[in-house]
Image (cartoon, rainbow, N blue to C red):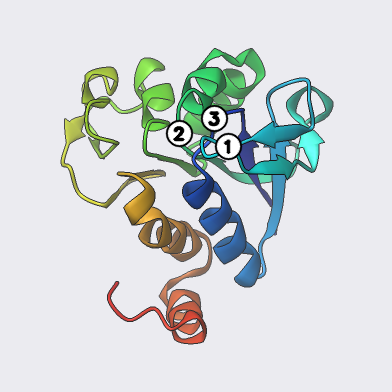
Amino acid sequence: MGTVYVFFADGFEEIEAFTSVDVMRRAGLNVEMVTVTPDEIVTGAHDVPVLCDKNVVNCDFFDAELVLLPGGMPGASTLEKCGELRNLVLRFAQEQKPIAAICAAPMVLGKLGLLKGKKATCYPGFEQYLEGAECTGAPVERDGNIITGKGPGAAMEFALAVVELLQGKEKVQELKEAMCVTDL
């Protein structure tokens, strides 16, 4: 099994990033936290600092199984401006490998034209960046290899959707029971 790469920039949404990393690691996935900024310590939208595992410029992503983009501002805008990340996301799309983005981050996919004709969701007000997508407003959407999430309140459902894509419904049920998740 490969590695899931979660991308961080100053202003990331903590709940979305940490819930995703935590749930995927509980599922036994190999998860790496990657900064797209020169500093390895990245500070979230609510002033929570995190030390990332790697810097995007030092990764070759040969073992990448899924890429995940948390939202938050200006974090999502910084992700969108990172050439290495855009190239990786485009490569994943071309190879039909899984891509996940939540909150403001689906705009990265939308601006690359990857959501055309697909069902997607995002933080209210960011629909304008989801070029050609059918914006549903649902907490989580999965259309083919792309999973999108609406915002912080959908973080658990989003993380579990990623685990389901990679490991199946049985693993999700196991995690829900272990974490006392009853309403998803």
| Relative to 171, residue 112 above or below | above
Residue 19's spot in the image, x, y percent?
52, 58
Query: Which mark identifies residue 128?
Result: none
Cα distance in 3D space between marks 3 and 1: 4 Å
Cβ atoms at labels 2 and 3 below 8 Å apart: yes
**Amino acid type of disc 3?**
Gly
Q: Tell me which numbered mark, 1 or 2, is placed earlier along the sequence.
A: 1
Cβ atoms at labels 3 and 1 below 8 Å apart: yes
Label 1: state its secondary structure. loop
Cβ atoms at labels 1 and 2 below 8 Å apart: yes
| Relative to 128, residue 168 above or below | below
Residue drawn at (74%, 27%) of the image: 56
Residue drawn at (43%, 23%) of the image: 108
| Relative to 9, residue 100 above or below | below
**Amino acid type of disc 1?**
Gly
Residue at the right extreme, as displayed:
58
Residue 39 sits in which quadrant?
top right
- Quarter holding the C terminus? bottom left
In the picture of the structure, the residue carrying the numbered disc 2 is 72
Query: Which mark identifies residue 11?
Result: 3
8 to the left or right of 71: right
In the picture of the structure, the residue carrying the numbered disc 1 is 44
Residue 83's spot in the image, x, y percent?
62, 13
**Amino acid type of disc 2?**
Gly
| Mark 3 nearby-residue class (10 Å; few <14, some 14–19, many ≥20) | many
Q: Is residue 2 in view?
A: no
Cα distance in 3D space between marks 1 and 2: 8 Å
Q: Nearer the viewer, residue 109 or 94?
A: 109
Cα distance in 3D space between marks 2 and 3: 6 Å
| Mark 2 nearby-residue class (10 Å; few <14, some 14–19, many ≥20) | many
